[in-house]
Structures are given as structure tokens and as C-alpha cells.
Amino acid sequence: MYKTYLWISCLLLMLLAGCTNTKKKTVAEQEETTFTNPVIYSDVPDVDVIRVGSDYYMVSTTAHMSPGAPIMHSKDLVNWKIISYVFDEINESPKNNLEGGNIYSRGQWAASLRYHDGLFYVFFGTGNKSYIYTAKDPAGKWEQKLVIDEYLHDASMLFDDDGKIYLAYGARHIRIIEFYDDLSGINPNGLNVEVIPAEPKGLLEGVHFYKYGKQYYMTFIWWPEGGIRTQICFRSDKVAGPYEMKVILSDDMGYASHGVAQGCFIDTEEGDWYAMLFQDHEAVGRVPVLMPCRWVDGWPMLGDENGKVPPVMEKPIKGYEGKTELVVSDDFEDTKLDLTWQWNHNPDNTLWSLTERPGFLRLKTGKVVNGIFEARNTLTQRTEGPKCSGIISLDLTNMKDGDCTGLAAFCSEPGTLTVTQEGGKKYLLMTDRSVEKARVEINQNQLYLKMDCDFTTDDALFSYSLDDREWMQLGDKFHMIFSMAHFTGNKFAIFNYATRETGGYVDVDFFRYNK
């Protein structure tokens, strides 16, 4: 009897162990086949996504940063990498070079990405002008096709079945115009009509223009008075209208009444449909959100069956490994900067180098300025939520009195760890919106600076080390913000500028990133 009981007990334990192992395997499998929204927890606003075969390409806004209009690639709509930029620099005025002013909150906005007859197209505006660039290989060199001496707000291109090329654009007053067939300019004898005359009331912009079947569709962000940001769609069987309207998504995912809105539709090779919109997430920036798109009575209804964005959902395409890499560590061993880096405004390429001291990024001062917002060659990467950190290693040997260098949470109201030299002595300062909060003297030329970001609270901590092992916090928590004064999320920024005389420089050994 005892042996029988023992045998049954062992059998039960074996079965329970098997069930436990099966459960663990299921969880692991779920992690491989699902994702959590936001699909990219970083500042990637105004997205436009297209599919070419089994490849997906995305473009977004980078405002005053250079190079600009990043082209990202994915195989599953979830994991993305930057493969190129549409342009290296925009030179509309000296302000693009921080001469006589700046272009903060302006620059490249809300691009439209299209593929037609073997060629990729990107249309974007800057607040002053509008541009079309083309490329045969989206990872290669993009060529300027057309410059329009007019800003066409938040525009979207459409290549129609009959060969005509249209552009929808505007805010509240939405117009459709027609290009020449060779895209040499706007056709003055072509279609030019206001299709949405300031209705409905409230913010209406960020158009994405499509033809599906025999219907024309325009989808927008709409912010009704007293409501949340909403995604709205207009459709018509004629390109010139009239258009009828329907709300296709109104959901803030429980995040502080920040509605998910403005973006695009994408199909898969299997015929499934999705939408990529974005959501304001305060200090980290505007983050992309991926969701199902369901065609109901000829309307692209977004979210699940209840019209809500799934916080966790199945990956649209399975079987692809990898991860999103929009922020990376860098030891500066290459002769080119990683594509994840962007300069604040156009850089002065005579004042930085990866070759003068191999394995280091050299940043030289070339102009006396009043502060970081006037400084050329401030080098940035995005931050990522929910938490992340960045460390830089600095060689301070060749600083001059009045020089300022360090690491910043860069936005319109920055927090910084700044090394400054005064009377041959070096001091490390923590500043909060240009107000000094703490100071310590530094008696060596090798220094490590660290910034820890917590986007669950939007707070950052600054610390330093003399040996890359023992870390000391400097100052109190810095509260990061998002502001339309820059219109970008907080970025890691490495800076070096002169306030008295030029000619000094610092060498950056590495940027070490952790998430």
C-alpha cells in the first residue's frame, strides 16, 4: 500500500512539473510573438509607414536636428532600425547654422513617404518651403527632386491609378492640388480645390491620403473642443469630393487624456491591416503606437472590436528576431558617426573629428556664444522609456578658460552636467534650466558623466565619477518637460562651447547606453 502511494505521489509530482514547464514555455513564446504599446517608447512623431514587398519603411519628424527625416526599416512593424536620412542639411537661412537666430520648433516636419514605379518619394515642409526627395534605394543617397517656395502644411502625396499625382495638405482648411506628371512642379491647370472647409471645429491636421479600391480616404488628427485628440477619416468616390466623415479612433489608453492620433494605415502581404499613430508622452516625446485596422462598411476602424488600442497584442508578422535600435552605445572607433546620432542644427564639420585622435570624438570650439542653445556641434541621441541611462567619458586636457562641456538632458528647458574652466581650474556644475544647483571642483582631466532618466516620473538624476566605478550624485532631481518651444522629446546631448575665446577642445572616449 505504501509503495503504491509513493508511486502515485511521484507520478503527480512529475505531472505538475510538466505543467509548470509548459506554462513557462508558453510565457516565453508569448514574449516572442507579442509586443507592448507604445511599440517604440521614444520620440518618433508624425510617422508615415509604407510596405514594399515584405519590407516596411518609416519616416518621422526630426525638426531642427541634422541629418533629418530618418528612414527606418522593419520586417515586422515592431522592430525598427535607421537605415538612412533623407537629407544631411537644410540651408534655407543662416539660422539653420545658428547664425543670427535659430530654427527651434521648426525645421523638417511631417513627411509623406511613398513608393511608385520603382522609386521612393519623401515630401516634407519646413515652415518656409516644401521639398520632394527621391531614392531608388531607401538605404542609399536621397536626391532633391523639387523645391517649392511655399510651406504646404502636413502634406500627403497620392499617386493615382490614372497617373495623376496629388497632394493633400493644410490645417482645418484642407486642400488637394495636382502636380505635373513628371513632378517638375505644381500644375496650375490641374486640380486645386478645398475639400474640407474648416469643419469639423477644432484642430484638424496631419493628413494621410490614400486610395483603397475605388474610394479616396484622408485621415487626420482631430482635437475637438472639450475632447481628446482623436483620429478621424474622410472618404469619397471622387478625389475632389464631396467627402463624408467618421471618427475611427478615440482612445487615450488611460494616459492623462492624451489621445492616440495622427498617423497612417499599412497592410501586410497576407492582407491584414494596421495603423501606426502616435501619442504625446510628455518628456520622452511623441511615441508611436501600433494597432489593428478593421475595415467595417468601407471604413478603416482602428483598435480592437471595442475601438480601444490594445496595450499588448500579437506581432503582425512573426518569425523575425531583433529589436528596435534607435539609441545605441558608441566607442567612436568608426570613421563615421552611427546613424542614431543627430546634431542640433547643421554642424560645422571643421570643428569635429573622429580621425584626429582615433577612437575618440573630438569637439572643438569655434565661436564664442552665450549658452548651449547657441552652440554648434551639440551631438544628440534620443532617450527611451520607461527608464534609460547614458554615460560619457571626457578628456578635459585641452579646455580653455570659459569653455563649457558636458552632458545634457536637451530640450527647451535643459538640465546639464557642465564642466567649466576658470583660472585654469575645472569645476563641475549641475544646472536646472540654466540655474546652478550644485558645484564641485575637479582636479583631474579624465571625467565620467552620467544621466539617468525615469519617464514614469519624468525625472532625471545627474552623477559623476573619477574612475568609472564609484558614482556621486550632483544636485537634486531634474524634472524634464516637453515643450512646443523645441517640439522634441528630451535627448542625450554631448556639448562643448566657448564663452570667452575659441581654440579649446575636448575628446569623448565613449557614450555608454543602458535601458
Image (cartoon, rainbow, N blue to C red):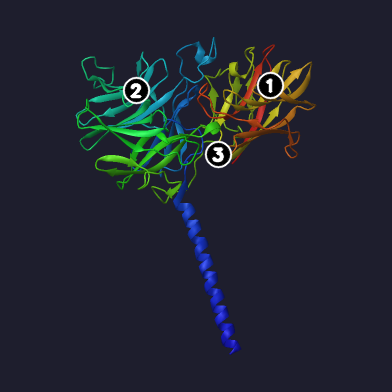
Instruction: Where is residue 171? Give x, y as percent.
Output: 36, 22
Q: Viewer-proximal residue, 135 or 78?
A: 78
Q: Viewer-proximal residue, 226 or 126?
A: 226
How far apart in space, not on screen, are marks 3 and 2 (Cα)?
33 Å
Q: Amino acid at mark 1?
A: Val
Point out the frontmost of discs 3 and 2: 2
Q: Secondary structure at mark 1?
A: strand
Q: Amino acid at mark 3?
A: Gly
**Would you name the residue on which mark 3 appears?**
385
**Residue at the front extreme, as displayed:** 226
Chain-order first, disc 2 or disc 1:
2
Q: Is residue 66 above or below residue 305?
A: above
Name the quadrant of the C terminus: top right
Residue 151 has which mark? none
Q: Viewer-proximal residue, 356 or 330?
A: 330
**Would you name the residue on which mark 1 appears?**
435
The structure residue drawn at horizontal position 24% and vertical position 40%, both measured from the top left corner, is 298
